[in-house]
Amino acid sequence: MGGPDLAASPLWSAARTLAHRSDPGVVSLDCRFQLMQPLAGEEAYRSGHLPGAVYAHLERDLSGPKQPTGAGGRHPLPDPETLAAWLGRVGIGNERTVLCYDDPTGGHGFYAARAWWLLRWLGHEQVYVLDGGLPAYIQAGGELSREIPAPVPAVFIPLVQPGWVASAEEVQARSPETVLIDSRAAARYRGEVEPIDPRAGHIPGAVNRDWAAAQDETGHWRGGPEQAARLGLNDSPAVLYCGSGVSASANLLALAVSGRQPGPDTRLYAGSWSDWVHGDGVSDPGPGRPVQTGEAAGEQERPGLDL
């Protein structure tokens, strides 16, 4: 696919996945999910998954509890200790290699990136995403299993990376040279549609870089030079957001494919748009943060149920 060399890439090919399918040092996380059908991913997992894979539910395992006011967004970051305890329960210790996968069919190819980013945020470096997702594995001759594994518990000690997450206040006070990237579909960025959150539009000053353009029509991730050109950051510091901090992880993964890793200069606004505009504007006026519409630099038109 034209990306960086394998040693530096956050991606595993289907061939490499097949070569490690019996490796006891590798744990696979099945991250399939659908926003409007929250049980669909787990049902798909039970119908067939990578042998030995454990299921990671976006809202139960890879997010924290939502606040009644909506502050923190629709998919808040999980508490690091809580996430680390869950990782240990499913057999992931600090010494294990983790392979995250989803199914990019139908625009669902960003959930594995969420798991990848969370593990990186907890200081875990040996974590990868299956390029092309489950379809690529099957096309390469990989077999599926319906057996639900019984993991041997492990110990995962989190080493939370400082400065990787931006708050709404930090987004508002960002420096002029900081690029704010809205990772949602262009129509949502422009404010023409808003299927989920109480207000439409984008954070003033943000540029639109639809996460979906990070993948080609087969669901494989585009190569490093293409990702770098698409995102257009050069050496500028950046904060990325989306609807609720999930699909922005796909653009963070795309940056890693290009050789730029998450860090204090490449941060996630985890609450994202759903935190920025929380409240219904009537009984709960919310924070009243500014909103901008129009003026998109969108890369492709598509319906946008971006998380």
Image (cartoon, rainbow, N blue to C red):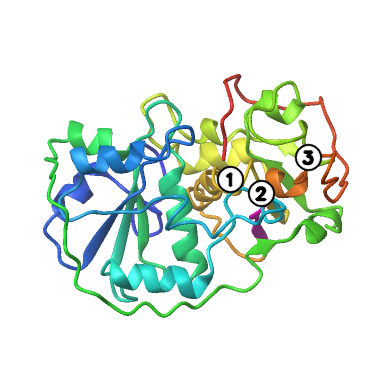
Q: Is residue 269 magenta?
A: yes
- Image quarter in which the C terminus is found: top right
User: Label 1 neighbourhood size at 10 Å, few (<14), some (14-19), many (20+)?
Assistant: many
Task: Specify whether residue 182 is in view.
Answer: yes
Q: Tell me which segment is drawn in magenta.
A: 265-272
Q: Secondary structure at mark 3?
A: loop
Identify which amino acid the numbered label 3 is placed on.
Asp
Q: Earlier in the sequence, mark 1 or mark 3?
A: 1
**Is 2 placed left or right of 151 in the picture?**
right
Residue 122 in the image: state x and y as whole percent. 48, 70
Separation of residues labelled 2 and 3 (CA atoms): 24 Å
Identify which amino acid the numbered label 2 is placed on.
Leu
Residue 160 in the image: state x and y as whole percent. 54, 74
Give the total of numbered labels: 3
Q: Secondary structure at mark 1?
A: helix
**Camera-nearest label, 1 or 3:** 3
Q: Residue at x 30, y 70 (%)?
A: 89
Task: Check the image and report above or below for 164 versus 219.
Answer: below
Q: Residue at x 74, y 60 (%)?
A: 167
Work out whether residue 296 or residue 106 is closer to the camera in this orientation and state it. Answer: 106
Q: Which residue is mark 3?
A: 280
Q: Earlier in the sequence, mark 2 or mark 3?
A: 2
Q: Which residue is mark 1?
A: 248
Q: Which residue is mark 2?
A: 240
Identify which amino acid the numbered label 1 is placed on.
Ala
**Is 58 placed left or right of 135 in the picture?**
right
Question: Marks 1 and 2: in contact by CB < 8 Å?
Answer: yes
